Image (cartoon, rainbow, N blue to C red):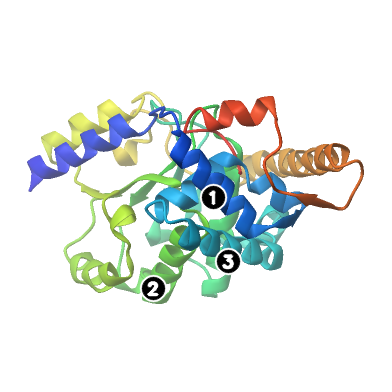
Amino acid sequence: MLNSMSEDLKKSVSNGHEKMVISQEEQAKITEVRRLIGVLSDKASVYCSDASISRYLRSQNWNVKKAAQMLKRSLKWRKEYKPEEIRWEEIAEEAETGVMYRPNYYDKFGRSMIVMRPCCQNSKTTEGLIKYLVYCMENAILNLPPQQEQMVWLIDFHGVKMSNISFKAARETIHILQEYYPQRLGLALLYNAPMFFQPFFSMLKPFVETEVYNKIKFGYSNHHNTKKIVKDLFDMDSLESAFGGDGDTGFDMNKYAERMKEEDNKTLSFWTQTKLDANSDASNNKKIDCSPVPNPDQDILVAQRDIKAFG
């Protein structure tokens, strides 16, 4: 079993930063999805880049109708939930214990990181926790480097009790990830999960799609293979000691709050600028036709599947 986990993690390494040229047939499917989703608002049109549509198609095994339906559901959710408008002040209370945060480092393949510590769970409601999760994912995606589109979740189970784990929250997390962030997860490493978590995970399994399930790996600090693979994945000088690294430990709420406030400014700037660009491209029209238009930047996106983009 340990050797199997090692091989699976090696696959995660090799697939984390892979460039693939989109074929003419695949590009035709992207074009067809654009036709099916029709005219979009400014933000929606930015979200619906070729790279984004490609992720939805891949998640649906390149079935155009299913991908278009899934994308429409995502666009409806984004319009109503407004994930890009969540600000630090709204979720600061959820973050204060260090239950979840984006560390200021990446894995060796440029994937953004999200650290989770269930033992620090302090959420009063599932809705509050999910809102903070969405905030973290949006920020992780915004900070992806060029030619990378995935994030890594590091889940530290140290000190976890059964009372720290919510089936409702776990199921909603899976739903949000699969339905509205397809192909965004590169790896979820469950580190030192206790024995009592196994039956809990078995209960969750029916709700986890195969593509996501294959990216969920268990690792243990006392296993040699886990240590080796962690070294292959991460810069040990940056990685926190909780995961076997030599980096700084502990969560400083004040420092993190300042950093996230700066990130909020970056988020606002990103979406404001993209809206201005969209309006400019559309001759100041409020609605944009999302049908294919010659665009040098999009040509770059088409040439590869792994890309830094909210779209």
At horizontal 21% and vertical 69% (from top left) the residue drawn is 202
Residue sitting nearer the eye, 138 or 210: 210
Q: Is residue 105 above or below residue 208?
A: above
Q: Which residue is mark 3?
A: 73
Left or right: 297, with 302 as reference point: right
What amino acid type is highlighted by mark number 2? Ser
Does residue 96 appear in this view? no
Graded by Cα atoms within 10 Å as few (under 14), some (14 to 19) or many (20 or more), the crowding at tag 3 reads some
Q: Is residue 116 above or below residue 231?
A: below
Does dot 1 land on a helix, a strand or a loop?
Answer: helix
Q: Quadrant of residue 308?
A: top right
Q: CA distance from mark 1 to mark 3?
A: 18 Å
Mark in front: 1 vs 3: 3
The x, y position of residue 270, in whole percent, is: 74, 39
Left or right: 62, with 221 as reference point: right
Which badge, 1 or 3, is on the more N-terminal residue?
3
Q: CA distance from mark 2 to mark 3?
A: 26 Å
Residue sitting nearer the eye, 193 or 24: 24
Q: Which residue is mark 2?
A: 166
The x, y position of residue 105, in whole percent, is: 48, 31
